Image (cartoon, rainbow, N blue to C red):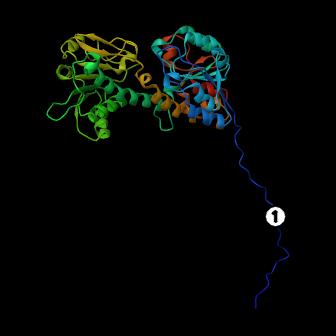
């Protein structure tokens, strides 16, 4: 026999309050992407795919006419992604957030609106005091995207551009060793019965490692110099094979330069300037027709004979040695570079929405603060303040006082 359930007279239902998650206030962005007309820039900071994601999440995006053509992204691509195509540059600068792939030019600084946010690279040697004064006067929040750090402390955009520069430097060398560009007719690498091409790399950082990997892949003999034993060990471990490595000792370096076919300069700058480790005398003893690719030219260069060239006229000869000294190598493969930059900036802009705006993400994330060099009328980058002899304000302290 089944027992009936017993209900105590003291039993009662106690209503509970429903707990709901309180979301942060989302803030939609008005993003402007201008066409780059300076610094030989072919990249665009947001691809159509990234724009589509942003538009579908409620953001407004204005793209200047032909802004992406240097990377083979066309107005129709951005229009289909939901962006508005703008034909007047001044209209692009009515956006609250400007995204650029080249540093701010004189013309663009005049077009900036008060209290705007600007994401762009910054080339400290080319930064002008007049541009800095305008940024301060208009209380711009200026963020150098190459200085932004991710959650593990790395520089994602710098790393991507360094990988591109390292890989592409070997392809450039292969081109100028061939007869097509009046080289000496050497195949970079080697074939059965023919000794491999000798590649010397100065620097064991990301650029040097990528260059070594590409050269090994083509069958070249690779020798790497760096003053950091740790970086040399890391390079060998990452590549997964033994190769010639040495500290930067002048006698050994001079001997190896005499025998190499390609020399790649990829040393890290010290206090903003690349150490010049290859003298004019060393270059004069190199083989005729050999190729120098000075990736470090944007910070002075590793070779005494280096001087800045352009994508239109990329090479010159000194002592019959071909010199390639274009500072913005990544712009030569702009579509790949654009995708790499966009992969970093698009999620960052999405985080700005989720946290309530750009100012909020700057407050919350220390990695973003690393990229801020001007904040509402204050210089928050010590190197920039020192260079122009202006007052420096620590951004952490500034935000703490206004919190």
Counting the numbered discs, the total is 1
- Up-down relation of residue 236 to residue 267 (above or below): below
The quadrant in which the N terminus is found is bottom right
Can you name the residue that lies furthest to the top here?
A: 130
The one nearer the camera, 356 or 192, is 192
The quadrant in which the C terminus is found is top right
Can you name the residue that lies furthest to the bottom here?
A: 1
The one nearer the camera, 88 or 136, is 88
The one nearer the camera, 116 or 175, is 175
Q: Position of residue 51 (x, y in %)?
A: 60, 32
Can you name the residue that lies furthest to the left here?
A: 193
Q: Position of residue 301 (x, y in %)?
A: 34, 16
Q: Quadrant of residue 28?
A: top right
Can you name the residue that lies furthest to the right here?
A: 9
Residue 16 in the figure: left or right of residue 152: right
Whether residue 349 appears in this view of the structure is: no
Whether residue 383 appears in this view of the structure is: yes
Q: Position of residue 344 (x, y in %)?
A: 52, 33
Q: Quadrant of residue 55?
A: top right
The one nearer the camera, 26 or 41, is 41
Residue 204 in the figure: left or right of residue 352: left
Secondary structure of the residue carrying numbered label 1: loop
Residue 43 in the figure: left or right of residue 113: left
Neighbours of disc 1 within 10 Å: few (<14), some (14-19), many (20+): few
- Residue located beneath label 1 in the image: 14
Q: Position of residue 90 (x, y in %)?
A: 65, 14
- Up-down relation of residue 56 to residue 259 (above or below): below
């Amino acid at each position: 026999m089944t027992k009936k359930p017993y209900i105590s007279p003291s039993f009662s239902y106690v209503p509970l309050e429903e707990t709901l998650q309180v979301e942060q206030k989302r803030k939609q962005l008005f993003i402007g992407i201008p066409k780059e007309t300076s610094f030989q820039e072919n990249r665009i900071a947001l691809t159509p795919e990234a724009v589509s994601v942003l538009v579908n999440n409620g953001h407004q995006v204005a793209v200047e006419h032909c802004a992406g053509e240097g990377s083979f992204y066309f107005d129709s691509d951005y229009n289909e992604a939901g962006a508005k195509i703008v034909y007047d540059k001044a209209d692009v600068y009515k956006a609250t957030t400007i995204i650029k792939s080249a540093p701010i030019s004189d013309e663009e600084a005049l077009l900036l609106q008060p209290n705007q946010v600007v994401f762009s690279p910054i080339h400290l040697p080319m930064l002008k005091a007049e541009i800095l004064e305008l940024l301060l006067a208009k209380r711009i929040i200026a963020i150098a995207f190459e200085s932004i750090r991710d959650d593990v402390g790395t520089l994602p955009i710098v790393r991507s551009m360094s990988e591109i520069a390292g890989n592409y430097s070997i392809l450039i060398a292969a081109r100028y060793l061939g007869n097509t560009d009046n080289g000496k007719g050497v195949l970079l690498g080697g074939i059965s019965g023919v000794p491999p091409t000798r590649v010397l790399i100065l620097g064991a950082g990301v650029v040097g490692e990528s260059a070594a990997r590409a050269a090994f892949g083509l069958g070249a003999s690779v020798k790497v110099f760096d003053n950091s034993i740790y970086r040399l060990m890391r390079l060998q471990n990452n590549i997964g094979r033994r190769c010639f490595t040495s500290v930067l000792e002048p006698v050994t370096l001079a001997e190896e330069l005499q025998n190499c076919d390609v020399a790649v300069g990829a040393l890290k700058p010290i206090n903003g300037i690349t150490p010049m480790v290859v003298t004019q005398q060393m270059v004069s003893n190199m083989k005729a027709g050999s190729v120098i690719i000075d990736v470090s030219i944007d910070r002075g260069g590793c070779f005494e004979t280096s001087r800045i060239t352009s994508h239109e006229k990329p090479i010159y000869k000194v002592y019959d040695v071909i010199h390639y000294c274009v500072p913005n190598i990544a712009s030569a493969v702009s579509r790949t570079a654009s995708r790499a930059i966009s992969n970093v900036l698009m999620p960052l802009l999405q985080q700005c929405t989720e946290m309530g705006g750009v100012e909020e993400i700057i407050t919350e994330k220390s990695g973003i603060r690393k990229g801020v060099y001007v904040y509402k009328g204050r210089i928050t980058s010590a190197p920039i303040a020192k260079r122009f002899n202006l007052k420096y304000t620590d951004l952490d302290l500034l935000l703490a006082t206004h919190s």
